[in-house]
Image (cartoon, rainbow, N blue to C red):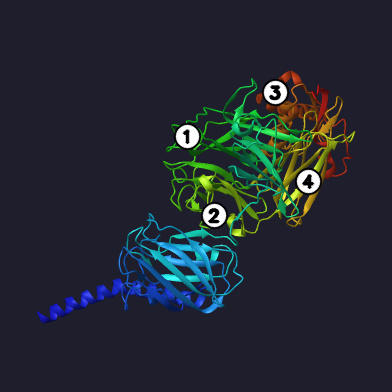
Amino acid sequence: MEWINMQAQRAELLQFIRIILPIILLVLNYNLTFSQQSQIQWAGTAEYQFNNYHDEYFTGKETLGPPDAFPPGILNRRAFRLESDRSFGTLVVAYHQPQQIQHVIIVENYNPGRLIQVKLKDTEGKYHLVYQKSPEKIRRDFRTLVISMPKTTYKVSSIELNINCISAPGLYQIDAVGILDSEGMEVIHSELRGANFNIEQEITFSERKELLSEQINSKYTEVKPLVSHDGSTLYFSRLFSPENTYGTRDPQDIYFSKYLNGQWSRAYNIGSPLNDDLANGICSISPDGNTILVINGYEASGKVSPGVSMSTRSTSGWSDPVKIEIEDFVNKSPYQDFYISSDQQYLIMAIENRDGEGDQDLFISEKIGPNQYSKPRNMGAMINTSYAEFSPFLSLDGRNLYFASDGHGGYGQSDIFKTTRLDDTWQNWSKPQNMGAAVNTSSWDAYFSITSGGDYAYFVSSEGSRNEMENIFRIPLWRDTESHPTERFITFTGKVEDAKTGKSINSDISLQNVDNQYTYLSTSDKSSGEFSLYVPSGKSHNIQVKAPGYITYEEKVDLEDIQPGEKAVKIVQLMPIEVGQVVQLKDLFFEQGKANLLNQSLPTLDRLLQLMMENPSLEIELSGHTDRVGGRTANMDLSFDRVERIKEYLTQNGIEAERIKTIGHGGRYPISPSDSEENRAKNRRVEVKVLEINVLN
């Protein structure tokens, strides 16, 4: 019997070893990996602790070295915590090798959110506040808080962490505190991977925000600041000012200021037709600065309704606003905000309707026609709450969205948040990230906008003002505020003119990244033909220039060697559409010896289709040509069948058959000798001849 008991005990021991050994090896291997390969410097000594739970366990010493309190989400003696779930506390950790840093990594392995302040101490003994936030209960059992900042000019020797478990009661633990000098988050995600870490980045700024001068901020309320993408012009609205169009009884007028010699000029009322007796405000501006959205829907009848309108600028000034038509547009709120993507394909709006979560929510509409957008779709519960979400601002690449919210928690009243679009549905977003204490306050903060170069952000806050009146602030940004930290913008300018007369042309310019990631739009000025765009450097783009009565111009533009801050210049000459003009269609592909069009031909066919749709009086002749290989009759039939197939494509897509004549010439009119395959290929072509055109100026 004794032998049987010994065997049972031995079996139980082996079973225990089989269970516990992999865990031991995992922890040992984890720590070994950190010690041998980690670029993160973890705390080396605990200098001070206040209100810690015990002097022997749950102490500050447990935060030294890499994370080791596994699994996360449960109380663990290998982490630091306070004496109770309702107390204040402080922990100071130091580093063996003081260094410049770009990230502080704090592994909150139980009940995160109670950390209210982080201070860096440099080798000169000076303190630098990099994180300050009200305590909160976060819907996570654990997280790794990453506080990111521009590279410090000083070396960090120690870090002070202050904890508040009174305002947000609960036991709270810190497992490890690290520092890192590395751009981006790649190293952190690489070293802290797996289920033990919920990584959450907090944005910090290189300098404090500054209140703009009296040239901008008056004794009246200033709201809705919007900076042009090149940073040269600041638009905003001023409430009930004697300088408003209708004086102090005028609720809100648009003003603008120019950035000259390093400072903002005196702000001027932008005047009519943008300002009237209503509440006026600019809510979006195109990359070239020549197209804006203004609140209120200005209809052709002269009536004004809820909604948004578009105005364009020429040498004579801003045009009368034209209402943007939005399907099933309903807004129950007295407030409304809008923002349009840089390619004008998507319209974001802050409205209240039956499809929302309550109060103002963010909705998205897609362009479905000229000046027409689809029924608004709710942008999802990750963004929208039962409280107000408003003041949307979209980055040039359409990925990052900044907005204000009363419903995501934070420092007090509305705070400014950032979220990143995760796919093309416009309803799948990252968790909104509070822009931090450098921007947000216990007061009302909103209307965040950024220059294309990413040097400054402008926003409005009621902090420190009397009667909670809003003023305009700005703050220097740093490269990781945007999702593409190395991306900078260049100025792409040019002129559009008639290829025959040299006359300036009012045209639409579209510049699309070769990867189809971004599209930038502009309009050339009617009197000068000039245009300007701000686009990412180091990339190639496809340019398209269109104007009524002219053949659309398309070309690949190589901007890879243009450095940030430099200018690229392009002169575009458009060929007028004239009776008798003959143009060869490029990049048409058929099956060998047949009339069947290949899919590679679709871009060319669509350009021809678009040209005929935009010029409804245009009548053309399609002439087909072959080489001289094969019989004459067969070639004549083949050339005719091919242009008939093109005509069929056009008519199936809405072009009247009467506008298109077809003829097959076979090999009768070669443009190249038949002495090589390359030359014979030149003879196999389709040409378009203009038979009739009536251009309306």
Q: Is residue 241 left or right of residue 446?
A: right
Q: Residue furthest top?
A: 658
Circle 1: element type: loop
- The amino acid type, in three-letter code, at marker 2 is Val
Q: What kind of residue is marked 4?
A: Thr
Quick check: marks 4 and 1 in contact, CB under 8 Å?
Answer: no
- What element does badge 2 sit on? loop
Q: Quadrant of the C terminus?
A: top right
Q: Is residue 350 above or below residue 409?
A: above
403 and 165: which is toward the camera: 165
Instruction: Indicate which disc, 4 or 2, sits on the residue closer to the N terminus.
Output: 2
Q: Quadrant of residue 506?
A: top right
Q: Amino acid at mark 3?
A: Ile
The residues bearing labels 4 and 2 have C-alpha atoms spaced at a distance of: 34 Å
Decide which of 479, 660 is in the foreground and name it.
479
Label 1: which residue? 352
**Mark 1 or 3, closer to the camera:** 1
Dot 3 or dot 2: first in sequence order is 2
Q: Quadrant of residue 24?
A: bottom left
Residue located beneath label 3 in the image: 655
Q: Nearer the viewer, mark 4 or mark 2?
A: 2
Residue 272 x %, y %: 70, 31
Residue beneath disc 4: 493
Which image quarter is the N terminus in? bottom left
Q: CA distance from mark 4 to mark 1?
A: 40 Å
Query: Residue at 47% across / 30% down in the picture?
Result: 332
Spatial CA distance of label 2 from label 1 is: 26 Å
**How busy is the neighbourhood of tag 3: few (under 14 within 10 Å), some, or many (20 plus)?**
some
Q: Where is residue 372 shown, x and y percent of the image?
A: 61, 29
For the residue marked with disc 1, what is the amino acid?
Answer: Glu
Q: Which residue is mark 2?
A: 439
